[in-house]
Amino acid sequence: MDFEKLIISARSVRRFSGKPLPEGFLTRMVNYARLSPSTRNLQFLKFLTLSEPSSMNAVFPLLHWAGALKDWKGPSENERPAGYVVILLDENLSTDPNCDHGIVAQSMVLGAAAEGIGCCIIGNFHKNNLSETLRLPENLSPCLVLAFGYPGEKIVLEDAASEKGTTYYRDASDIHHVPKRPLTELLYDQI
């Protein structure tokens, strides 16, 4: 797959098919994160993988899935992810994740997309409740939760129309639309 097609396929998936992840998938994703660039090469992020139904069921209600879809409470029980990776900041090594959590998250999203697996990067969650639920030591602070699974929805990229803006939406056929600003609007021409 060429890189542009990979980027286009790496959308935020919020409804999954229910099909289990391949053996070793979550560990592969963490390895992609491990191999990614790190600020001053400090490697201050840790990763917790979750694939057992009991732990995933405990984490699910602590996550917020789609802020722009006001009437949608998240995936139904049969549309939930098949696994999670929780990105943790080890505060014994750094008190600021800088941009490292975004870098490793994108590495995992692209790795998943290359295997035909979807991901949703979730930054809106109950941080204290998640830490308690996962029984995290005080030095580990959750930064992001990545939800993985085979896509169970159709997602379409489209050019953003100025009157509609960039807010994602679902149409009458329940297709998820993701408006993107045109490239000409993003390129800055310096004088």
Image (tube, rainbow, N blue to C red):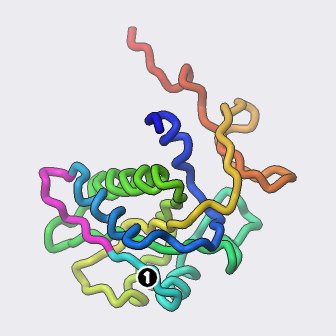
Q: Say which of 174 and 115 sits in front.
A: 115
Q: Position of residue 146 (x, y in %)?
A: 45, 66
156 falls in the magenta region: no
Q: Is residue 16 left or right of residue 117?
A: right
Residue 117 to residue 180: above or below: below
Q: Residue at x 24, y 60 (%)?
A: 34
Kindly tell me whether residue 126 is visible in this rendering: yes
Q: Which residues are magenta?
A: 38-47
Residue at mark 1 = 130
Q: Say which of 89 and 113 sits in front.
A: 113
Q: Residue at x 30, y 52 (%)?
A: 99
Q: Say which of 100 and 50 sits in front.
A: 50
Q: Is residue 29 left or right of residue 53?
A: left
Q: Position of residue 11 (x, y in %)?
A: 56, 50
Q: Quadrant of residue 16?
A: bottom right
Q: Amino acid at mark 1?
A: Leu
| Circle 1 SS class | helix
